[in-house]
Image: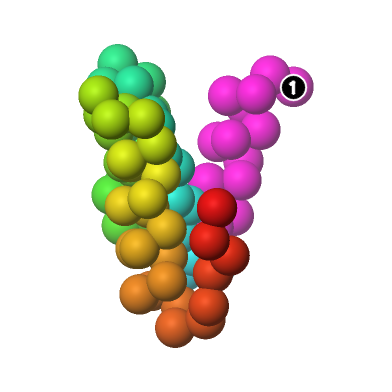
Amino acid sequence: MTGRDWLEVYFRALEEAGGQLVLSEVEPEALETLRSKGFTPEVLVAYLRQTVALAATEEALVFARNSTGAPMPVP
């Protein structure tokens, strides 16, 4: 099983369970590929890579903190 195959299986399981997958530092081309495979924005929350190192990861952490209400570790 390739990494992409595993991700598709995991995505479908999250979709069925009503969960979300948050990815950060995603290249635009990679996101386009995932969207073309049916990875919907409701389940796949993606933050594109930015010129400032780890800026997208910080945005993803803020999203995760606000989504769960649980404290998240600060890098």
Which region is colored magenta?
A: 1-16
| Magenta residue check for 28 | no
Residue 62 versus residue 71 in the image, above or below:
above
Residue 10 image position (x, y, % from top left): 61, 45
Residue found at the very far right of the displayed protein: 1
Considering depth in this image, is 61 or 68 the residue closer to the camera?
61
Q: Is residue 22 above or below residue 30?
A: below
The residue indicated by pointer 1 is: 1
Q: What residue is drawn where x is 42% and y is 65%?
A: 64
**Which of the two residues, 12 or 3, is positioned nearer the viewer here?**
3
Q: Is residue 13 magenta?
A: yes
Residue 47 found in image quarter: top left
Decide if residue 44 is in sight here: no
Q: As drawn, is 1 to the left or to the right of 34?
A: right
What residue lies at 33% left-to-right and 41% top-to-bottom? 56
Q: Nearer the viewer, residue 75 or 47?
A: 75
- The answer to whether residue 57 is visible is yes
Counting from the top left corner in percent of width and height, residue 5 is at: 62, 26
Residue 51, above or below 75: above
Amino acid type, callout 1: Met
Residue drawn at x 31%, y 52% is: 59
